[in-house]
Image (cartoon, grey):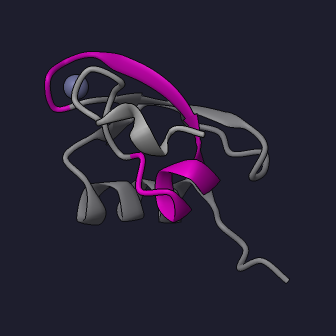
Amino acid sequence: MNKRWTIGKINEFVENNSESKLLTTEYQGFSQKLLFECECGNKFEKTFKKFKNNNQRKCDACQSPKASR
Ligand SMILES: [Zn+2]
């Protein structure tokens, strides 16, 4: 089973593991797209699964696109 994440834990993970900021305030599950703000100021949407497991922790402009799919 997946570890159960709350928006608070996700926020903590984002703060500790990336330069991005979490803007979404409600978490509904791994398939939900969360809104982040990149360190460059761009906003981007990503599921937490991708953010965490695929290391997609920046906006498309900062992130190399090779791992996007
Ligand atoms: Zn960026």
Residue nearest the observer in this picture, 55 or 30: 55
Whole-percent x, y for residue 4 in the image: 73, 73
Residue nearest the observer in this picture, 25 or 2: 2
**Residue at left 49%, top 60%?**
52
Q: Which residue is outermost to the left?
A: 40
- Asked whether residue 55 is drawn in magenta, I would say yes
Whole-percent x, y for residue 39 in the image: 16, 32
Ligand 1, seen in the image, is in the quarter at top left
Q: Which residue is outermost to the top?
A: 42
Q: Determine the image quadrant of residue 1.
A: bottom right
Q: Is 23 placed left or right of 39 in the picture? A: right
- Asked whether residue 48 is drawn in magenta, I would say yes
Give the magenta range: 39-56
Whole-percent x, y for residue 43 in the image: 36, 18
**Residue at left 78%, top 51%?**
29
Q: Can you say whether 25 is above or below 61 in the image? A: below
**Residue at left 41%, top 56%?**
55
Q: Determine the image quadrant of residue 66.
A: top left
> Which quarter shows the C terminus?
top right
Whole-percent x, y for residue 6 in the image: 63, 61
Q: Can you say whether 31 is above or below 35 in the image? A: below
Q: Is 37 placed left or right of 29 in the picture? A: left
**Residue at left 14%, top 23%?**
40
Q: Which residue is outermost to the right?
A: 1
Q: Can you say whether 57 is above or below 6 in the image? A: above
How many numbered discs sit on the rendered protein?
A: 0
